[in-house]
Image (tube, grey):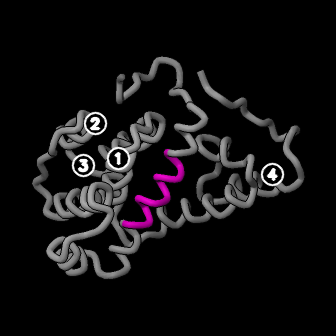
Amino acid sequence: MSRYREISVAEMTAEQKEVHDEIVGGRRGRFGGPFQILIRSPEVCRHLSRLDEYLRWGSSLPPALSELSICLTARHLRAGYEWYAHAPLALEAGVPPAAIEAIRTGAVPSFTAADQALVYRVISELIDMKRLSNTVFSEAITAFGERGVVELGTIVGYYTAIGNALNAFEVTLPAGATQPFPG
């Protein structure tokens, strides 16, 4: 059971309504998901929604690499709602179904695309070791440039913030959806 209730637009403070309208008027075009939690702190919500728009639609990284990074972060946090929202996007963007399933279950995925294999190593090192080895850093700079490496780290940070909010408020999956991380 969720630890929050949705706040209707009619119940929002002027500051919340302003942020709500900014989100609805942006690329996202709708209000919901984690923003229903984040709106409780309107300025946090405003800044994170702007970062979300950039990471989703303005990043130098192709969607497959961004979504793979998000799925790895969701798995690390066991953030079911985040996984529910982004695993289908990763598949649609070209991440192999077997790799998504391996990540979901905590197994080591196999990739045919070299850039996806490298992103897996980058994100895994950031999550597990809290830094990058010289080898992986060098490979990532060569493949993605400094901008791409900054964006990969930012995706982990942003989706960690989102996953923590979703987990803290125990956001449930829509009716009929299966919890991806049982137990």
Circle 4: residue type: Gln
Q: Is residue 63 above or below residue 96?
A: below
Q: Residue furthest front?
A: 129
Element assignment for label 1: helix
Q: In the rendered structure, which disc, 3 or 2, sits on the residue that comes first in sequence?
A: 3
Q: Residue 82 in the image: x percent, y percent?
A: 46, 41
Circle 1: residue type: Cys
Image check: 150 left or right of 136? right
In the rendered image, which residue does mark 1 sit on? 71
Magenta stretch: includes residue 157: yes
> The C terminus lies in which quarter of the figure?
top left
> Is disc 3 surrounded by few (<14), some (14 to 19) or many (20+) residues within 10 Å?
many
Q: Which mark is residue 16?
A: 4
Residue at the location (20% across, 60% down)? 121
User: Label 2 to label 1, Cα distance in Å?
Assistant: 8 Å
Q: Which mark is residue 95?
A: 3
User: Label 4 to label 2, Cα distance in Å?
Assistant: 35 Å
User: Label 4 to label 3, Cα distance in Å?
Assistant: 36 Å
Q: In the rendered structure, which disc, 2 or 1, sits on the residue that comes first in sequence?
A: 1
